[in-house]
Image (tube, rainbow, N blue to C red):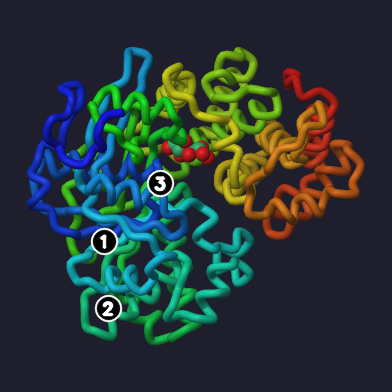
Amino acid sequence: MSERLQTLSGLAPTAKLPAYDRNQLKSGILHLGPGAFFRAHFAPFTDASLAAEGGDWGIEVASLRTADVADHLNEQNGLYTMLIRDTSGTTAQVIGPIRRAHVATRDPAGLLDRLEDPAIRIVSLTVTEKAYGMDTATGGLDLNHADVAADLANRHAPRGVIGYLVEGLSRRREKGIAPFTPLSCDNLPSNGAVLKRLVLDFAERVDPSLRQWIEANVPFPSTMVDRITPASTEATYQDAERLTGRQDLAAIETEPFTQWVIEDHFANGRPAWDKAGALMVTDVSAYEKMKLRMLNGAHSLLAYLGYIGGYEFIRDVMDDAALAALAYRHMHAAARTLDPVPGIDLDDYASELIARFANKAIAHRTYQIAMDGTQKLPQRLLEPASEALAHGDRAETYAIAVAAWMRYAIGEHGNGERYELRDPRAGEIAALIADVPRTGLAISAALFTLPGLFPAALTGHRAWTQDVADKLEILIQDDRLPLF
Ligand code: CS2
């Protein structure tokens, strides 16, 4: 076993190194949620902006839950390897902007101190949809969300994302320190606006004058983020070690494609992400809808159909011509719900997505994408479905996708083997269908009553709900994936 990745000296020549002086970096960004996606997207964009433009925008990261990644990053002085995989081969790049990692559960007071440090000018987030504590039915705060409830009861000792942001901003206001810019990088439509609404809602409940101050002083830019990033595996760690000559327990792997569209309003400066290829715009919503509905919508469709059909990876699903055709059809149907997107031809975009999904070098598990369906369905499938129906479209591709999710939600393969749903509402789902006969009609009727998930525009549309029931019946009868 080689020594651990800790410095940039003596690495194998196959490793590309940061093209700037890491010693010049200061902590300007605090990032919450240092998962694989952050390490494949935000950090490399920042790395490239430092290489292109210099500057001192270093990153501290904080994990709100698990300690592993933070510990590995600290053991490696913030360094880690990004593998880029394509059919032409794998390249390795060591990413340099991370300076320190924190674990909130171990030292909550320490994280609050970092939030009030005036040097921190941006607090960015990749915490996944479920961490926001949003009530999908209203778009406001979900008062039953465990973190939201705990933080409202104990606002000075938060544990959740919104609680930390509000307490951090509150301390800065009390001490006369300029606010940081919260920057959401999660797959939610208008993620900045969503975050703003939740933060203001929380602040209003604990201190209305704080709400006013935040509203007047804190920008919440929205972003569209995109890079397919499978969870790291043994193969990731082995290839990182082979290509850098160092053992790296924080290595990640990703695809060549990367895209970031950012609304350019920051309270207190930002790295030169535009010099690294990010597109700075005044309104991100058209890009975000495009990505959520065409990429993520098709991804969810393939993940549910693929998982129940026995396909382990998205690339395997794409080898099935019928399913690949379904994905393509879905993307085109989704495109019909979109307004024109500046600078993008949606046909080309769909073809590019098909090629990305089919990338043989990327092992992206259908089970990984299937996770957290109740948090993903609204923006990926249910909103475009409602709009399609309103325009007189049959919205059939959405009926297939929803039926596939419902089949998946039963939690049992055709051979009777059970699997874990991995959804924050898994308990509610199981309770709803426990005593229901396994028919498309009965299971769909039960799941349509899951509070707050399906909009009335869908559940009140008899032809569409019947279509879902029929398709679910087919999937229950035969999970070898009949053609629709
Ligand atoms: C995927 C996304 O896991 C999922 O739900 O659809 O993580 C997807 O890979 C990214 O959004 C691509 O940018």
Q: Nearer the viewer, residue 457 or 440?
A: 440
Which residue is identified by label 1? 122
Q: In the figure, residue 411 lies in which quadrant?
A: top right
Q: Quadrant of the N terminus?
A: top left
Q: Is residue 436 above or below residue 401?
A: below
Query: In the drawing, does residue 34 fall left or right of residue 477?
Result: left
Of pointers 3 and 2, the one earlier in the residue sequence: 3
Label 1 SS: strand
C-alpha separation, residue under disc 2 versus residue under disc 1: 13 Å
Give the class, few, some or many, for how many residues have Cα within 10 Å of label 1's Cα (few <14, many ≥20).
many
User: x, y (%) of residue 380?
Assistant: 56, 42
Give the class, few, some or many, for how many residues have Cα within 10 Å of label 2's Cα (few <14, many ≥20).
some
Label 3 SS: loop
Residue under the point 45% across and 73% down: 158
Establish whether ligand 1 lies closer than 8 Å to the Cβ of label 1.
no
Query: In the drawing, does residue 139 fall left or right of residue 468?
Result: left
Q: Amino acid at mark 2?
A: Arg
Q: Which mark is residue 457?
A: none
Q: Is residue 18 visible?
A: yes
Q: In the figure, residue 400 lies in which quadrant?
A: top right
User: x, y (%) of residue 295?
Assistant: 49, 33
Of pointers 3 and 1, the one earlier in the residue sequence: 3
User: x, y (%) of residue 238?
Assistant: 36, 26
Which residue is identified by label 3? 35
Which residue is identified by label 2? 172
